[in-house]
Image (cartoon, rainbow, N blue to C red):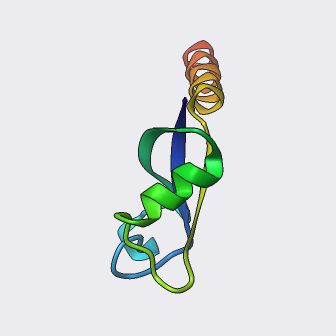
Amino acid sequence: MTDYIVYRHGYDDRNQSAARGLPETMAVVRMEADSAEEACRIAGAWVALAPNQYLSAEPAAEADAREAALNRTARTHQ
C-alpha cells in the first residue's frame, strides 16, 4: 500500500467557498491505498462533494517532496 493525498476540486459555498478564501483545489484526506483510484473511491464515501466537485489523488511522497522544495525556496528568499 502507498500513502496518497486526496484532493477535492471545485468551489461550493457549503464545503469549499471562494468567499471564505478556500482554494479551488484542496487536500482533504491522507490515506493508504493500493492506487489513486482506490484512494478516491474510499474518500468519496466520507468526503462531502457537491455535484460540480470531484476528487483526485497523488502519492503522498510526491506532494511531500514538492512541499519540502517550496519550503526550502521560501527560506532562501527571506
Question: Looking at the image, which residue is at 38% across and 82% down?
Answer: 13
Whether residue 56 is situated above or below residue 50 in the rendered picture = above
Q: Position of residue 67 (x, y in %)?
A: 57, 28
Q: Quadrant of residue 37?
A: bottom right
On-image quarter of the C terminus:
top right
Q: Is residue 49 left or right of residue 69?
A: left
Spot the residue most to the bottom: 51
Whether residue 7 is situated above or below residue 52 in the rendered picture = above
Q: Is residue 69 left or right of residue 31?
A: right
Q: Position of residue 56 (x, y in %)?
A: 62, 57
Q: Total label count?
A: 0
Q: Quadrant of residue 49?
A: bottom left
Question: Looking at the image, which residue is at 46% across and 82% down?
Answer: 50
Q: Which of 31/52 is in front?
A: 31
Q: Quadrant of residue 59?
A: top right
Q: Which of 13/38 is in front?
A: 38
Q: Which of 61/65 is in front?
A: 61
Q: Is residue 77 left or right of residue 32?
A: right
On-image quarter of the N terminus:
top right
Question: Looking at the image, which residue is at 60% across and 15% down?
Answer: 72
Q: Position of residue 29 (x, y in %)?
A: 41, 48
Question: Looking at the image, which residue is at 52% across and 86% down?
Answer: 51
